[in-house]
Image (cartoon, rainbow, N blue to C red):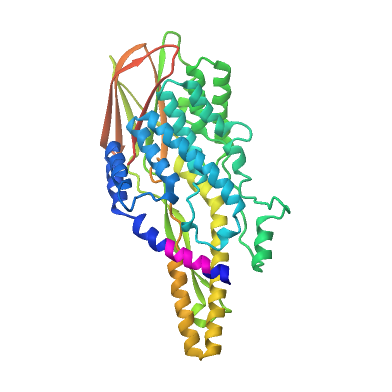
Amino acid sequence: MDLFKKSLKTAVFALIIASCSIYTDAYKRMDNAVENTDFESALNIIKKEQGQNEAIYSQRNAILLFLDKGLLEHYAGNYAASSEDLQNAERLIEEAYTKSSSEIFLSYILNDNVKEYPGEDFEDIYINVFNALNYYHKNNLEGALVEIRKLSESNGKLDMLSGKYNYKDPRTGAELNEIVRRETGVRRMPENIQVRFSNSALARYLSALFYLGDGRLDSFRIELEQVYIAYNANKNIYKEQIPIAVGELQNTPTGKARLNIISFTGLSPIKKEQVILHPMPFVHPILRVAALKLPVLVERPAIITKIEVIINNNYNERFNLELLEDIGAVITETYNARFYNILLKTYIRTLIKYSTADRIAAQAAKKKDERAGSMAAMSARTAMDISERADIRMSRYLPDKAYIGGINLDPGTYSVIINYYSGDRIISDMEYKDVTVRQDRLNLIQSVKLR
């Protein structure tokens, strides 16, 4: 009881502070800059806000600061700065995972918002994807491959993801449900699910490109085959046909050079608080309907429906990019597996709070009268409603889709235009002048339009 009361006071205090500092109009200004592909302005907003008394990213949100800043630096072409930020985020996520494993039961009492943000699985995955691209842009193909191997190798991040939430006490071997039942007396638990994402076509495609650029043809063919394996093994993610451009990588005619293009569009889903009313039949009447506050993913509107590439040569050749990876679907899949733990924690935490409030109300009624009991129940419920907030923290600037394409050209210098369509209308275009396309090297254009 004393632990609960102390924890509740801590949560209420921390959430009052957090509500004043985390959710500011700075996010809206950053979002507007990102939508307009003005990534430097978004970075300047972060720099300015972090210098204020109430920073947009508090100390407990250091991972988010490095993630958002690292992604924006990447989009802005500041690849060295992006690498540094993303590596800091990755290090802190590793530290947070170790810490959360040792404090797992405590998280059933405290609200997650008062803890340091530990990062999400999908954030940890795409850190390596974008850092690999950072290394490519710094002309370091081996560094790029090291980042991809963190995902794809045996016992890498993707390999370990499926069993990540099957927590067992290192001392007794007891599973999570058994621990919670023993400590709380709750017998019925929601059913756990496993992550159904074991291989990233995007990571494998980039790996194949990097091996090709490094002249390691056997490794290139192995990684290219893994793109097909990823599509076949993860039908819940890859619902479209595999892009024709994947197969074309192996068929560059003699004397020609291939120009590859990858484009990231849209903004991935983001968390919002959803309130679910849950009956509590065996407590004081004022407490019989509990509000479970859960962080659920909601999609952000995307307006880009087609991406056209125009090569300014003698033929003004045109082709459309194809969807390679629905990043939003990967995020949803990996988050849904963790959502079991979130639901479980919220349910147990709410049950403990309402049971405690019921005892407080009963004690007040016994000492005075029923009216005093009702007032105590009302006060306790108000405190609980203030303290119980869904943890909706996550990186805001991961893209929603990854598209690819390519064309075989005579070696030379070209101007490349990328048109972004919404329906039949071009809503934006990007021009890349003096693009040098060479044989026996990786020629890759990356474009970003987060709309």
Determine the image quadrant of residue 103.
Answer: bottom right
Residue 307: image location, x then y, percent: 34, 33
Query: Nearest the camera: 425 or 234?
Result: 234
Residue at the right extreme of this rendering? 172
Residue at 58% in and 79% down? 282
Residue at the top extreme of this rendering? 255
Residue 167: image location, x then y, percent: 65, 51
Q: Quadrant of the N terminus?
A: bottom right
Q: Is residue 204 above or below residue 383?
A: above
Q: Main secondary structure of the magenta part?
A: helix
Determine the image quadrant of residue 30.
Answer: top left
Q: Is residue 9 magenta?
A: yes
Q: Quadrant of the C terminus?
A: top left
Residue at 51% in and 14% down? 215
- Left or right: 370 with respect to 418? right
Residue 169: image location, x then y, percent: 68, 53
Residue 34: image location, x then y, percent: 30, 41
Q: Which residues are magenta?
A: 6-14
Residue at 54% in and 16% down? 216
